């Protein structure tokens, strides 16, 4: 079956724009569009450190930052981590924990403990 639409140029343009918008909108739902992040006012020393780490890893600075962003996004925030860990109970009290840490660390340098 063939349908022929007769319309003036203005309506044809409007229809093609609507189809193009619908097409772009429907594709956007199914396709993730990569995001870009720009960091302003980065100190030279900081960038040099990033460049050094990138060279050591054999990657570019943007690749290094992308990997770090992925790692950071996968980790819980400090608030989320504290919320989760506060729910855990422990048979040890803070006195026992501090005593175990002191035992691991050894005596104080000033001889006080």
Image (cartoon, helix red, strand yellow):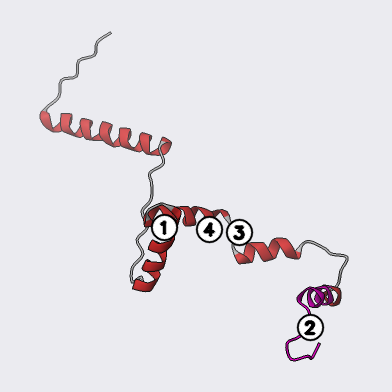
Residue 68 numbered mark, or none: none
Q: CA distance from mark 2 to mark 1?
A: 40 Å
Disc nearer the start of the sequence (2/1): 1
Q: Circle 4 sits on which residue?
A: 72
Q: Name the spot of residue 5 as percent of width and height, x first.
A: 19, 19
In the displayed structure, 44 sits above or below 17; it is below
Q: Residue at x 88, y 65 (%)?
A: 91
Examine the rendering and report whether any part of residue 43 can be seen: no
Is label 1 in a helix, a strand or a loop? helix
Mark 1 vs mark 3: in front: 1
Q: Residue at x 38, y 57 (%)?
A: 61
Residue 93 is a magenta residue? no
Q: Is residue 80 left or right of residue 16?
A: right
Q: Quadrant of residue 105?
A: bottom right
Is label 2 in a helix, a strand or a loop? loop
Question: What's drawn in magenta, residue-wise?
Answer: 97-113
Q: Circle 2 sits on which residue?
A: 107
Q: Name the spot of residue 74 as percent of width and height, x first.
A: 56, 53
Q: Residue at x 86, y 69 (%)?
A: 92
Q: Circle 3 sits on which residue?
A: 76
């Amino acid at each position: 079956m063939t349908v022929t639409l007769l319309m003036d140029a203005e309506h044809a343009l409007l229809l093609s724009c609507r189809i193009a918008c619908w097409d772009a909108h429907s594709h956007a739902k199914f396709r993730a569009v990569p995001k870009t992040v720009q960091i302003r006012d980065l100190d030279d020393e900081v960038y040099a450190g990033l460049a050094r780490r990138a060279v050591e890893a054999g990657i570019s600075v943007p690749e290094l930052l992308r990997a770090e962003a992925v790692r950071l996004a996968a980790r819980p925030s400090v608030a989320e981590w504290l919320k989760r860990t506060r729910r855990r109970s422990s048979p040890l009290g803070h006195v026992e924990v501090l005593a175990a840490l002191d035992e691991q660390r050894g005596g104080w340098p000033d001889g006080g403990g």
